[in-house]
Amino acid sequence: MTVLTTVTAALIAGAALGGVLHATGSLRSVADVYGLEGVVNEWTLVFCHSLVAGGPFVALVTRLSRGRYVPQPLAECYRSPFLGACVGLSYGVVLWVTVVAYGGPLLLGLATARPYPVPVDHWGSFVGLSTFGAVFGAWYPLLRTFFAERR
């Protein structure tokens, strides 16, 4: 049930992420990182990244829900779409800082031996990952309840 919920929420949030990246003109940059081009590659990579990013979020939410000394709003974020969206928004910002602003340029610099500016001010991806986190965080509790009732 958790895998189905995670994959479904990741696909919904991936569609939102791709939509924001497309609207901001940043969708092409996803494929550019891998040296690829084309709309199919861009969307495939967005959905693959969404699936990869969804797992740690679910692990975080599950850990928070079982935490003994976790504040009540954080402990309830796996049940509430609003609280889930708030935690998801924070998760999206952390993703952007660690992956886009600092992690990506540092890894590309190591791989190519060329210096890349740090931090990267890629605001389209900031809006996209913030949206991804909020959408994933809101949909995860809804889908979790939906699939649990169908069991």
Image (cartoon, rainbow, N blue to C red):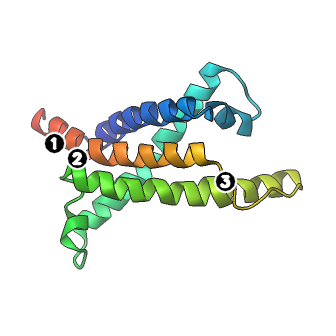
Whole-percent x, y for residue 117 in the image: 78, 58
* CA separation in Å, label 2 and label 3: 32 Å
Q: Which marked residue is nearer to the observer: mark 1 or mark 3?
A: 3
Task: First in sequence, mark 1 or 3: give its number.
Answer: 3
State which quadrant residue 41 falls in.
Answer: top right
Does the rendering let one see residue 47? no
Callout 3: few (<14), some (14-19), or many (20+) C-alpha neighbours within 10 Å?
few
Question: Picture quarter containing residue 42?
Answer: top right
Q: In screen coordinates, is 49 left or right of 83? A: right
**Amino acid identity at mark 2:** Pro
Query: Residue at image x 40%, y 37%?
Result: 13
Front residue of 118/103: it is 118
Count how many numbered circles sit on residues in the image. 3
Report the front residue among 90 and 77: 90
Residue 150 found in image quarter:
top left
Which residue in the protein does label 1 denote? Answer: 145
Q: Which residue is drawn at 59% across and 60% down?
A: 98
Crowding at dot 1, Cα within 10 Å, few <14 / some 14-19 / many 20+, comes out as some
Q: Mark 3 points at which residue?
A: 121
* Outermost residue toward the bottom in this view: 69
Residue 141: assigned label: 2
Q: Residue furthest right?
A: 113
Distance between the alpha carbons at the discs numbered 1 and 2:
6 Å
